[in-house]
Amino acid sequence: MRYLALAAIVPAVLLAGGTVSAAEIPSLHVTTASAKIQPYEPGARGVTYNEKLAPSGATLSVLAVSSSNGSTVLLTTRGLLPKREYGAHVHVKPCGPAPADSGPHFQDEKDPVQPSVDPAYANSRNEIWLDFTTDQTGNGLAVARVPWGFGDREASSIVVHETHTHTDPGHAGTAGARLACLDADF
């Protein structure tokens, strides 16, 4: 996590729809990451696992502002398939050669049963859900706000999934295959 100058943090929080008190300034964490996705190779920050649904050269970008009082995460995409629904979530591990390498979803209150499909844990209040639908040119935008911060806990990537996120018991939090991944140190 990076600590940025006050001049950079306050506009980012305000842009994300939040407010800033003087007491919060030292505890704000800002994360930015952006990469064109490509087939995995060591050192790649953005990876595609499915060229058909997440083509090489598409761009994933994230801006996150987090404090102990809450987090706002903004995901933008360029160059994915046009007019298509995708799901996306923050995951606990960085991207790797296999889609499962990014581990499970980051959860504020961790479900003792993994993978988590219990709606009590796998929900948009306990996880970062960034579902989006691309426009006619393949660009997408999603914003998630939660009332908790990442702190020093493990949150290391955003994974783009095949479908919007399901909410029904036994499937809660699932969104189909992992299509692409972006390393982001939350």
Image (cartoon, rainbow, N blue to C red):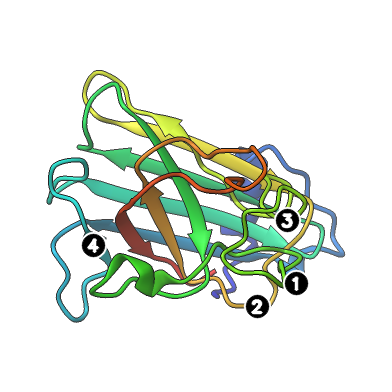
At label 2, the amino acid type is Arg
| Mark 1 or mark 2, earlier in chain | 1
The x, y position of residue 23, in whole percent, is 87, 65
Dots 1, 2 in contact, CB < 8 A: no
Separation (CA) of disc 1 from disc 2: 18 Å
| Mark 1 or mark 3, earlier in chain | 1
| Mark 4 or mark 3, earlier in chain | 4
Check disc 3 and report its element: helix, strand or loop. Answer: loop
At label 3, the amino acid type is Tyr
Disc ID at residue 121:
3
State the quadrant of the N terminus: bottom right
- Residue 150 quadrant: bottom right
Look at 21% across and 57% down and name the residue there.
48
- Tell me if 45 is positioned left or right of 122 in this view: left
At label 4, the amino acid type is Val
- Residue 157 quadrant: bottom left
- Binning the other alpha carbons within 10 Å of mark 2 as few (below 14), some (14 to 19) or many (20 upward) gives few
Q: Nearer the viewer, residue 115 or 29?
A: 115
Residue to which mark 4 is pinned? 47
Look at 60% across and 69% down and name the residue there.
114
| Mark 4 or mark 1, earlier in chain | 1
The x, y position of residue 44, in whole percent, is 21, 72
Separation (CA) of disc 4 from disc 3: 27 Å
Check disc 4 and report its element: helix, strand or loop. Answer: strand
The x, y position of residue 9, in whole percent, is 62, 57
